[in-house]
Image: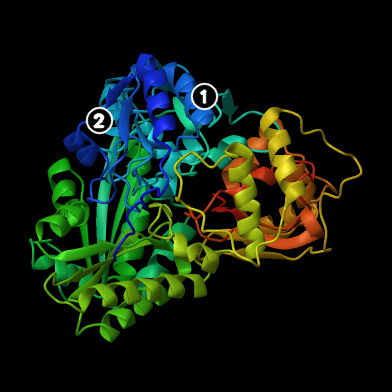
Amino acid sequence: MSIPTAPTIAHLDRDAIEKFTAAVADHGEVITDDATLVARGHDFWGVGGTAELLLRPRHRDEIAAIMRIASEYGIPIVPRGGASNCSGGMMPANGRVLLDLSGLNRILDIDVEARRARVEPGVVNSDLQDRLAPHGLCFSPDPVSAHLATVGGNVIENAGGPHALKYGVTYNHIVSADVVLPDGSTVTFSADHDGPDLLGVLIGSEGTLGIVTEVTVALRPIAPVTHSLMGAFATAREAADTIAAIIATGVVPAAVEWLDRDGIAGLQQFYDTGYPLDADSIVLIDVDGSATEVARDQATVERVLRERATEVRVAEDEKARAALWYGRLHAPDSVVQSGKGFFIGDVTVPRDRIPEMQAAIQAVAARHSDRLLFISVCGHAGDGDLHPTTFYDKDNPKAAAALEAANNEIVEAALELGGTITGEHGVGTEKVQFMTKRFTPVEIAAQRSIKNAFDPAGLLNPGVMLPEPAADEPATPAFAASVRAALTGGLAPDPATALTAGGDREISVNLGNLSLVVGAEATLDELKRHLDAHGVRCLAVPESGGDRTVGELVATAAGEERMGVRHALLGADVFVVDGDAPARFGAETMKDVAGYDTKRLYIGSHGAFGALTRLIFKISVAV
């Protein structure tokens, strides 16, 4: 699919650029060399543009001054980290300045006892992991691009990876972030701050709200033992049902990865995957923990696999595990080395809808088989996050149009199945056109209010994530005022404000997806009884809640209750305060990085952004 290049600014204010360049000279290295601008202005996939100049700060404390000067002269700033982004999220252009943060790469502190680390934004993920390993610790996000991706990039993309099923995405592991706002002011967003979850809004914001200058990350112990298993299946439905059956036992695998028949056959053209070519789908599973825990969980997983799979493989040592995972982990490399044209997609559906999504993708491939080579499907089955990779002949003049049509059809299918347009790659510029399919005009308007509150001049990473304003997009001044008040610390609870509305008390548990949909006016005692009856639990639900409603819990969440809500909340049906317009932010998908994570504003907001009507949470099997 063709990703748009950054536009050239028609009326470049040359005087402003020259004054900006002179003013920032003391705050970083100014580079105007054409070769450097071209090289640094394009990401790993070759997408991007050429900036007016590149600015490389020498210290994180210089960023505030740089942003103040940019604000004064009206200069758009495009932040750059490791440039491993897959969605055209970095679009420098004539008249824009590329702010290269990759040199801010110091690991400032590792607190082994507290299991925390403070790092600058340019620290590469894999470098941090190498420093942590001797302490028996790791930073949970493990994207395939870890050798390129920076921690700052992990934050602004809300990176996940294969092991997010058990350990969560970046959001679940950020303690705090020091941020420079577009006007040059500084703020620290913390996970334990009461009130609207501004840290949660920043995470996944794709560099459009602020420049991260320092991050405190939570660490976890490296599991002493990890074993891997593979199951091959005759149908995608049997594979998906098996995953559900495994999770229903109470075992939470460290990873559950998926490859489909066409993907295996297609990749086999480029290298030997080692996978059975007659399987419709294969599933790769990691179990980790202590030796005792792994022995127990492996036995359970293997039993379920052998009851349902056509072939089962087990790998217990590192050599065998590497061989089992080789085909999946080297898929991106094979894509690049194939010499074929390709496009790596990213859609997420509820886990129990994966078979329908796989069928939809292969139907798309069949419809365009005369112009495209094949579409392989791999992804994170535990999260429902799939990466359909479309291959085509670069010399086929009809391929570009077919690729765009196929991608559109895949996104439409994901939305029809209750999914979303991106689970971990981000919107960037590549998926901006799908934002109005994913969100209603009022939902877009609320997100635009977030952008305007943080960046009223629109100078930070322009053109990324949000579509151009449309005629049917309503004004949301009250919502915007609440965002600004939260940002400046002036949001005061109004006891008269309604926290919930609509009277919904229905409770629905989806065991196949391990998600819970509950009316905001159900009481916590009602919900607790329902969860107990289904043998599941939810981190957000306190042991004793009484007659408080679920909506009240979320809207007033503080302290430990707030942390439980933060980690369990998937989505919220709400009223946007302007005109009480209904909206939904989030969904039953376990991964979703489409747009700003607006539901986070409703946590602890005491109704300032509108009333809650329904909530969606992650659940787990009680053991």
Is 58 displayed left or right of 323 in the figure? right
Q: Position of residue 298 (x, y in %)?
A: 32, 51
Q: Alpha-carbon neighbours of circle 1 within 10 Å: few (<14), some, or many (≥20)? A: some
Q: Residue shown at 27%/41% (left/top)?
A: 41
Using the numbered discs, state the Cα–Cα distance from disc 2 to disc 1 in whole angstroms.
Answer: 21 Å
Q: Based on the displayed image, in which of its 4 quarters is residue 392 positioned?
A: bottom left
Residue 81 seen from this side: yes
Q: Based on the displayed image, in which of its 4 quarters is residue 306 positioned?
A: bottom left
| Numbered badge on residue 68 | 1
In the rendered image, the quadrant that contains the N terminus is: bottom left
Of 595 and 79, nearer the camera is: 79
Q: Work out which residue is located at the far right of the displayed protein and give it.
A: 496
Of 523 and 4, nearer the camera is: 4
Q: Position of residue 201 (x, y in %)?
A: 57, 42
Q: Alpha-carbon neighbours of circle 2 within 10 Å: few (<14), some, or many (≥20)? A: few
Of 23 and 376, nearer the camera is: 23
Kind of residue at disc 1: Arg
What SS does tag 1 mark?
helix
> Which residue bears the numbered disc 2?
32
Judging from the image, the colouring scheme is: rainbow
Residue 539 seen from this side: no
